[in-house]
Image: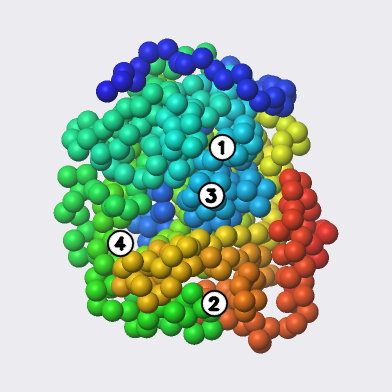
Amino acid sequence: MAATGGPLRRRHRGAVVASALLTCSALFTCCVRCDKPSNIVLILADDQDVRLGGMTPMTQTKTLIGDAGATFVNSFTVTPLCCPSRSSIFTGQYPHNHAVRNNSLSGNCSSELWQKGPETVAFPLYLNKQKYQTFFAGKYLNQYGKKEGGGAAHVPPGWDQWHALLGNSQYYNYTLSVNGKEENHGDSYEHDYLTDLIKNRSLNFLDNRSPQHPFFLMLSPPAPHSPWTAAPQHQNKFVDVKAPRDGSFDKPGKDKHWLLRQAGNPMSNSSVTFLDNAYRKRWQTLLSVDDMVTAVIQKLTDIKELNNTYIFYTSDNGYHTGQFSLPIDKRQLYEFDIRTPLLVRGPGIKPNITVKAPVLNIDLAPTILDIAGLNLSNLNVDGQSFLSQMAPSLRNGTARPFFLVEYTGEGLETPDPACPKLGPGLSQCFPDCVCEDSYNNTYACVRSVSANQDLQYCEFADSESFVEVYNLTSDPHQLENIFKKIDPSILQIMNQRLIKLQSCVSSSCSDYGSMKFMKG
């Protein structure tokens, strides 16, 4: 394997970025010494839910980050699928602006178009220009490393150290791009288990950093994504755990869009056994992530950087295991798929606080760049910094009243050979030929989260022009579609908000006054 230490690679000189420089007197996001900007660590899990107990195994993470800082109870992805969601995290943009539609190359996932466009203005480049030492390890985008996208030789601009997985999540038998060169791995736990490799190389980076400059680490482990391969020491944990049976578990999707109506109810015994095994194995894989978080925080303590470091823990999207009789996946508009964990600690954040204001994954980039001292008005982002929500002593700000969730469905051109009776246009039809996606599983939603209003309004691009509306105050599990019962004036307001959000760009995405903000 290639060595992981040594000097940092030469920085990329690519895109033109904002020239605003950080000064401690202006931003107050540095440590008490005030001799350099704050460091930043972003840990991004893969498919970790929050509504179905996904944070339960993360006991150390909840103590070391959540209890030491802020826990966000209304954190959402703007699209519940890996590649478009991660593209939103890197750019701070809604999918309709960065144009990544799904996990395929044809859907713009790590495509040449992505590389020539949105990737050139992703937030790591701005950090690098601010003299941050930047390190990435783990899963980047699902199609990264494909020949059509330049293979392993392609290293996105802004990264000094790059240890990226080629393709989708794996735990063993994978290939990395290490600063543009292929590095192959086998099935040895000591040398190859990806979560531990990410941990070890991040610790090595911290040991070899330049103390004169701040650093940014992004750690992107495969857990708890399939194939759910736990480390040997964790494979016998949670043996009696099963997926939760409350809420919408195995409830029929009788008043929902056709994809949910096609799911058999009740689920077969084989589907239930499959999803219970998946649920348990997901928890097992997360124990290594919890160990990684602990090790990184201990290292930051050892090198005396913990008090000057912001640490973010989150996921790209949620997940479901049996809700509305859908065995396992994401991609749906419901709370279990669009809500994500988010914990943050760092300078100016009081310990053990709960933040109720809604925040989105498109807010991560502007928040990180706000911490680094950039003038956000110069940036083309749809999100907004939530530094004021977790550290009000550092920033003034207001919570957004509503936001957009959008998804473009994906299907197969020919019938799935394992499910020939289903026909073309469907995908993710397992187990037992229950399909989780289709071409016309394409929707856009307005979600409002406030003390006065907790609503979701969704429109589908299908032959039925199907609409789903939920009052989450009275129906938190989204069991009843109230489209035919709700006041038509509210439907009109939500529809107009949706139209404007679907075409918003940059600052217009937060121009709520023009979108008929409803107080009641």
The residue that disc 3 covers is 106
The residue that disc 1 covers is 112
**Can you tell which of label 1 and label 2 is closer to the viewer?**
1
Q: CA distance from mark 2 to mark 3?
A: 25 Å
Please give left or right for residue 308 compared with residue 292 in the image: right
Q: CA distance from mark 1 to mark 2?
A: 34 Å
The residue that disc 2 covers is 257
Residue 330 rendering spot, x and y as whole percentages: 45, 61
Instruction: Say whether disc 1 or disc 4 marks the residue closer to the N-terminus.
Output: 1
- The local secondary structure at tag 3 comes to loop
The residue that disc 4 covers is 279
Q: CA distance from mark 4 to mark 2?
A: 26 Å
Residue 452 rendering spot, x and y as whole percentages: 69, 70
- The local secondary structure at tag 4 comes to helix
Looking at the picture, which amino acid does disc 3 mark?
Ser
Q: Count neighbours of disc 1 (C-alpha within 10 A) and say few if under 14, some if 14 to 19, many if 20 or more.
A: some
